[in-house]
């Protein structure tokens, strides 16, 4: 494979611009919040340079109003209030930020763990969270800090942090529960990403806004709690904080004495800090939501591709007597019934059949991607000789995405909305050991060329792409590790017909170039006939006919296939209205004694087709059919044997 341009120089990165502070600066609210917070921070830090006075020493006349020597006046104990405000900022900020950070860390860990793992772990965490949540906050703070009295600022930070986390944990848990069901998290699981990576890389960025909001509100809660505790005389009142300033002002009856400035200074400080936290909260929300358009993209040039064809002898995928379905309270649904199918290397096999006949279940079960309540009851599915159905989780993780991948109908939803496309393309490769930055970049650009997207879109966010482009990205990701098999379940159904055909054409080109085998499922039979080497026609969970696409189209043998072929417009000629197939397929919860198509078949042989089941046998070279009109072979039948009971 060749391409057109030289490798571009790596995009220059402006560290400051890309940092959280840099990003925050671009949001007006974030900028104001940052200015207030940084001003407080530096005033506290450089307090000794700004004021010559010791905040604790009462060296001046008492209750002086604001004036030249003392810009904020003095206390009833003769201390300089401006000095107290500056020094007080230190501990106030430390308590707020440290308590906020610890509390957020605990809340996030608890909430995410409960949501991600669920089950018993989730239940225990929930119980702890609820217990801490129902205990009233301030009384608990008072009791705990009364015990720790005199043990310093650290204990105040810990007390506040340990009482402030449950609310955040609850919010995080409910958000993470929703997120966990999103397609991109499922896709990350399927692609073999570790739990830690899924939680931190896939889920956490989507929760950044909530976590930040939680951090700033708990920081504010901490500042107010410290003020309340100090005001009640429970905190460490020997230290100068804005809370202890309020305590002493109240204790010395500042307002009654007319020294309003003593209350106003720390009160305003706390209010201003609260405002800064709230503004930063808005700012973080803006930057964590890529739709706000704060991110940039850097267009890139093309690079050579060296696609290595995958070789193999015999069938690449051998599905043998596969029985799969769904375990429901009403009993088992046998959606795939004793299916045997071989896929050769580089072969494009189309799966067709009416809705509900088991196409998706077959594709997912054969690739061990069927999720609960889906169950593989029995059978084998050997990829290059290795039975996917008997592999352990680690073995599966090793080969998923690398040896086979999957693209399904709503695949575009697997793209994480807050992560740049480039990183998502990298993810599957990194999970399988491709670590080198230059290789990742080269490969990503090759893939984009392969699926026909400008590589400048690598640095875009999913919402900046159209549906068709997103689907192409997902196809590019599915091809990232040059798997030998790609299963595509209606990958283009959500797209308009022109885009569908275009993408399909490209997939077919890629398949030929890389010698990839494809199992393709679609309701667009004309497309399938055009693209497929062979087609398998499914009915009621079984393959009833299997032949070359030409044979299926020109010389269908099974009455069901014949009906199906006349039910869609011809590839050329008049596009007249076609007839549907009268009747409905049988319920897949039932055991069927005769031919599953019996009720709808106009050619049925009474007394035979309803009592005996036709076996799928080869009636011509490369043409298998299960119908008594073509062979007398009877399927001895297999009862359901749940010898495996595995799912994804
Ligand atoms: N989670 C489930 N629980 C119970 N039965 C299910 C479940 N999912 C699918 N089924 C049943 O399994 C059968 C096969 O479904 P499947 O999705 O494999 O069909 P399909 O051929 O892919 O259909 P479509 O063309 O509409 O995608 C259907 O009868 C369906 O009702
Ligand atoms: S076996 Fe009988 S009922 Fe079934 S498709 Fe053939 S003719 Fe029709
Ligand atoms: Mg389906």
Image (cartoon, grey):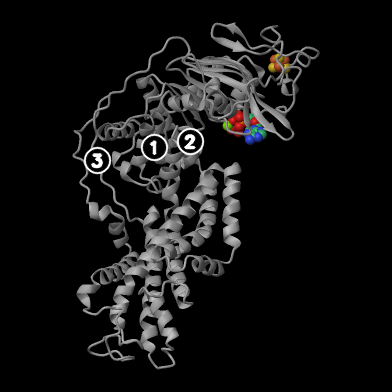
* Image coords of residue 387 (percent x, y): 52, 17
**Residue under label 3:** 300
Ligand 3's quadrant: top right
- Binning the other alpha carbons within 10 Å of mark 3 as few (below 14), some (14 to 19) or many (20 upward) gives many
Q: What quarter of the picture does the C terminus occupy?
A: top right
- Which mark, residue 291? none
> Which residue is depicted at the point 72% across and 27% down?
586
- Binning the other alpha carbons within 10 Å of mark 1 as few (below 14), some (14 to 19) or many (20 upward) gives many
The correct choice, above or below, for 475 with respect to 182 in the image is above
* Image coords of residue 210 (percent x, y): 46, 57
Q: Nearer the viewer, residue 183 or 451?
A: 183
* Side of 182 relative to 102 (left or right): right
**Residue under label 1:** 473
Question: Which residue occupies the extreme bottom position in the image?
Answer: 257
**Residue under label 2:** 189
* Side of 15 relative to 118 (left or right): left
The correct choice, above or below, for 89 with respect to 382 in the image is below
Q: Nearer the viewer, residue 193 or 268?
A: 268
User: Alpha-carbon distance for marks 3 and 2?
Assistant: 30 Å
Q: Nearer the viewer, residue 625 or 396?
A: 396
């Amino acid at each position: 494979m060749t391409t057109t341009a030289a490798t571009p120089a790596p995009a220059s990165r402006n560290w400051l611009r890309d940092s959280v502070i840099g990003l925050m600066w671009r949001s007006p609210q974030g900028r104001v919040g940052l200015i207030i917070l940084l001003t407080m921070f530096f005033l506290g830090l450089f307090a000794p340079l700004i004021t010559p006075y010791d905040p604790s020493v009462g060296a001046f006349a008492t209750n002086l109003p604001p004036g030249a020597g003392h810009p904020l006046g003095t206390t009833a104990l003769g201390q300089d209030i401006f000095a107290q405000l500056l020094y007080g900022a230190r501990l106030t900020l430390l308590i707020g930020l440290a308590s906020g950070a610890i509390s957020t860390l605990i809340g996030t860990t608890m909430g995410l763990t409960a949501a991600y793992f669920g089950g018993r772990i989730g239940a225990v965490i929930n119980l702890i969270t609820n217990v801490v949540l129902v205990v009233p906050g301030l009384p608990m703070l008072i009791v705990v800090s009364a015990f720790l009295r005199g043990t310093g600022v650290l204990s105040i930070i810990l007390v506040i942090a340990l009482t402030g986390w449950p609310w955040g944990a609850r919010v995080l848990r409910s958000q993470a529960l929703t997120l966990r069901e999103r397609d991109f998290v499922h896709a990350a699981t399927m692609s073999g990403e570790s739990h830690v990576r899924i939680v931190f890389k896939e889920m956490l960025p989507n929760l950044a806004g909530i976590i930040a909001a939680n951090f700033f509100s708990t920081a504010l809660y901490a500042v107010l709690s410290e003020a309340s505790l100090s005001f009640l005389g429970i905190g460490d009142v020997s230290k100068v904080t804005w809370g202890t300033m309020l305590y002493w002002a109240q204790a010395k009856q500042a307002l009654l004495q007319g020294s309003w400035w003593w209350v106003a200074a720390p009160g305003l400080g706390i209010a201003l800090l609260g405002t800064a936290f709230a503004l930063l909260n808005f700012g973080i929300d803006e930057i964590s939501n890529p739709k706000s358009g704060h991110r940039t993209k850097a267009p890139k040039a093309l690079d050579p591709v060296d696609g290595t064809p995958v070789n193999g002898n015999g069938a690449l995928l051998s599905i043998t007597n596969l029985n799969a379905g769904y375990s429901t309270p009403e009993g088992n649904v046998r959606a795939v019934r004793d299916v045997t199918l071989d896929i050769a290397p580089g072969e494009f096999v189309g799966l067709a059949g009416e809705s509900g006949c088991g196409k998706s279940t077959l594709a997912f079960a054969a690739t061990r991607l069927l999720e609960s309540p889906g169950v593989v009851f029995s059978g084998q599915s050997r990829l290059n000789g290795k039975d996917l159905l008997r592999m352990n989780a680690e073995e599966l993780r090793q080969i998923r995405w690398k040896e086979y991948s999957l693209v399904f109908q709503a695949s575009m939803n697997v793209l994480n909305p807050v992560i740049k496309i480039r990183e998502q393309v990298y993810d599957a490769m990194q999970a399988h050991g491709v670590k080198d930055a230059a290789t990742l970049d080269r490969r990503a650009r090759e893939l984009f060329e392969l699926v026909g997207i400008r590589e400048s879109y690598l640095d875009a966010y999913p919402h900046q792409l159209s549906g068709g482009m997103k689907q192409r990205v997902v196809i590019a990701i599915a091809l990232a590790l040059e798997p030998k098999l790609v299963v595509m379940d209606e990958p283009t159904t959500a797209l308009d017909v022109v885009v569908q055909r275009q993408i399909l054409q490209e997939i077919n080109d890629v398949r030929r170039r890389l010698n990839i085998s494809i199992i393709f499922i679609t309701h667009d039979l004309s497309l399938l006939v055009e693209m497929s080497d062979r087609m398998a026609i499914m009915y009621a969970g079984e393959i009833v006919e299997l032949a070359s696409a030409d044979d299926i189209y020109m010389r269908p043998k099974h009455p069901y296939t014949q009906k199906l072929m006349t039910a869609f417009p011809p590839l050329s000629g008049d596009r007249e209205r076609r007839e549907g197939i009268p009747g409905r397929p049988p319920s897949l919860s039932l055991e069927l004694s005769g031919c599953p198509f019996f009720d709808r078949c106009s050619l049925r042989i009474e007394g035979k087709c309803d009592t005996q089941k036709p076996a799928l046998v080869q009636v011509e070279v490369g043409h298998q059919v299960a119908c008594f009109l073509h062979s007398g072979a009877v399927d001895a039948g297999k009862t359901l044997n749940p010898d495996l009971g595995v799912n994804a």
